[in-house]
Amino acid sequence: MKTACIQSDVILGDSKANLEKMKTQINEAVKENVHIIVLPELWTTGYCLEEIGVHTDQQEAVISELQSIAKSNNVILIAGSFPIARENGVTNTLIVINNTGEVVKTYDKVHLFQLMNEHHYLQSGETDGLFEIDGLTAAGFVCYDLRFPEWIGAHSQKGAKVLFFVAEWPIQRMNHWEILLKARAIENQCYVVACNRVGKDLANTFGGGSMIIDPWGEVVTKGSTNEEIVFGEIDPKKVDEIRGTIPIFEDRKEGIYKKFQKNN
Ligand SMILES: NC(=O)CCC(=O)C(=O)O
């Protein structure tokens, strides 16, 4: 499955301009016959959290345009995350669109990142990130979720073979980004596909470095710190091969873990 991560820069608070730019980049990716395209976290608005409520109205039109793009190009979009207005506030929501243009998954970021003030402006999600694409079980997460291995692991234990991460991850913690992505691939014996933005906002410079990592922890492809499209292949058979070689899911000792948690 040929996969592309579009690690774009983001114009702060300008959904229309960001969509126009993203459409051009999606067209470029489509020319390379990709199966799956992954976009970054909050790429329509960036982290303009103080005024995020003003931008939520425009997201429905953007998502509907992406649905048409997915359908007309026969491509799956792990469409990044969007600020979505809910009853209790605004969530940072990952959207997955299949190749017939249907929204097949919405996942609200569960772990809000205090260092970037998300907890002051956003509501956290409470539901899982599992979905199916072309008969393959996958899971999607948003940025800081990467630091929570129990949460990611719960998804591989439910059958996920590919883990998608969409991010706005600052450049000063790129060593964490790379090590954590590799660790999540190895410990879950999953492909990891991670798309991070580049460029700056008022508070941060973002590091790009989008990656595809195979279930053995080998880097299939890695982006630079510049705007670019990062391409790589996912081979789901490799997941089964590696799980057959070192059967960590069979060897788990669920009873012992539960006993320890209960007694402490
Ligand atoms: N947008 C985010 O969630 C950033 C997470 C991050 O930078 C980290 O170090 O974790």
Image (cartoon, rainbow, N blue to C red):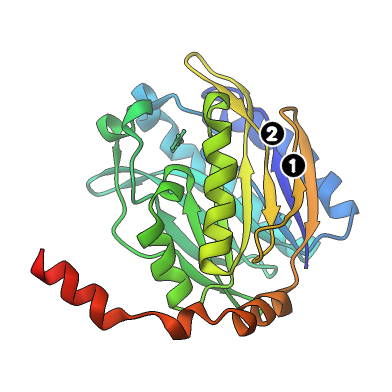
Residue at label 2? 8
CB contact under 8 Å: marks 2 and 1: no
Q: Nearer the viewer, residue 235 or 260?
A: 260
Q: Nearer the viewer, residue 54 or 233?
A: 233
Tell me residue 32's x, y (percent). Answer: 89, 54
Tell me which numbered mark, 2 or 1, is placed earlier along the sequence. 2
Q: Which mark is residue 3?
A: none
Tell me where residue 51 appears, x and y as whole percent: 37, 23
Dot 1 falls on a residue whose secondary structure is helix
Q: In this view of the protein, which residue sits in the foreground, 86 or 164?
A: 164
The answer to whether any part of residue 43 appears in the image is no
Q: Residue at x 51, y 46 (%)?
A: 81
Whether residue 51 appears in this view of the structure is: yes
The kind of residue on which mark 2 rests is Ser
In percent of width and height, residue 229 lies at 78, 42
The mark closer to the camera, 2 or 1, is 2
Q: Is residue 180 left or right of residue 76?
A: left
| Towards the viewer: 137 or 223 | 223
Where's residue 72, x and y in %? 78, 62
> Horizontal placement of 105 versus 241: left or right?
left
Q: Which residue is mark 1?
A: 23
Q: Residues within 10 Å of mark 1 (few under 14, many from 20)?
A: some
Residue farthest left in this picture:
263
What quarter of the picture does the C terminus occupy? bottom left
